[in-house]
Image: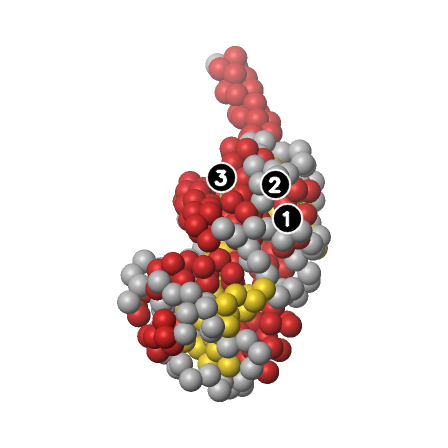
Amino acid sequence: MQRRQFMTGAAALGAALVLPAARAQDMPPGPVKIVVGFPAGGGTDVLARLLGQKLGVLWNIPVIVENRAGAAGLIAAEQVARQPGDGNTLLMAHVNSHGIAPGLQPKLAYSVERDFSPIALVGKTPTILIGGAAQPAKTLSELVQQCKAQPGKIVFGSAGTGSAQHLALEIFKARAGIDVLHVPYKGSAPLMNDLMGGHVQYCFEGMTTATPLLQSGKVIALAQTLQQRSKSQPDVPTVAEQGYPGFEASIWFGMVGPGSMPRAMVQRMNQDIDNVLAMADVQEKLAQVGAEDGGGSVQRFADFMKQEQQKYAKTIKDAKIVAEG
């Protein structure tokens, strides 16, 4: 009897000792750093800080955000790709670094498939096709008619050659069968100034930048680029519903880590990010920046990134887009 009690007690003690060790394998051994490839205050940074604060509470370890801006997010991606797979360094990936760059940059310093572990899709935001308030075309069909009547003369700006905004334009040009004059800028701020000044007639722009200008009446919206209307812009029709079914050109964000992360850790982080994205206060803040459709499995995010890379690679090849610099 005593021997049986001893064996039972030893087994329980062994299980108690093993459980924390097994649990520790699915969490990083120390503080977690989320690297953001853009300056503080932008949409990517806002989402990273929102997730970081909530995950720090869930994991009971510090989660900090580090901004490492430059090259449209590629510098940050290169840095994280070289880190060990212990989970201490993550990246808030962006459509630029993990969707567009593989097809645009022939000498890209990393492979999305080899050097990163997909963790979770955080959200997608539409780009919005906007025009100066004085422009004659007020609907998408009117704009297409105008472009076909004046091929190569209607001026569209973008935040830069190869940017998400530029690629949205190229995808639309191909679908609508139009030819326009593309003028790339070094970012959205100078582009918006020239759009309002009448030097540029139209552009695809991110919701975060476009929304305050729309609210003030300084620009008009003709379409948005998710397949369903964003909750943040319910009165703006989609490109898809205006005669181009299936059209989508989103700006998206997702959490990734170095390629050698343990599968158990990736799955644990995926589940925790899913839980955070479902929180009511997080949902409210996501709606403020127009981020939707986040969450789901690791495989969902991996498949989504692969589809995005294929789509943009084809667009870049067909449009003969060459990276700047």
Q: In the image, what residue occupies the spot 66% across and 57% down?
A: 38
**Kind of residue indicated by mark 1:** Leu
Classify mark 2: helix, strand or loop.
Answer: loop
The spot of residue 13 in percent (x, y) is 57, 25
Q: Is residue 259 above or below residue 309?
A: above
Q: In the image, what residue occupies the spot 68% across and 62% down?
A: 40
Q: For mark 1, what is the residue?
A: 74
Q: Which mark is residue 267?
A: 3
**Kind of residue indicated by mark 2:** Leu
Q: Is residue 316 left or right of residue 260?
A: left
Q: Nearer the viewer, mark 3 or mark 2?
A: 2
**Alpha-carbon neighbours of circle 2 within 10 Å: few (<14), some, or many (≥20)?**
some
Q: Is residue 178 left or right of residue 23?
A: left
Task: Name the residue nearer the viewer: 316 or 284.
Answer: 316
Q: How many numbered badges does the structure rendering display?
A: 3
Q: In the image, what residue occupies the spot 51% across and 61% down?
A: 166
Q: Is residue 195 above or below residue 314?
A: below
Q: Which mark is residue 108?
A: 2
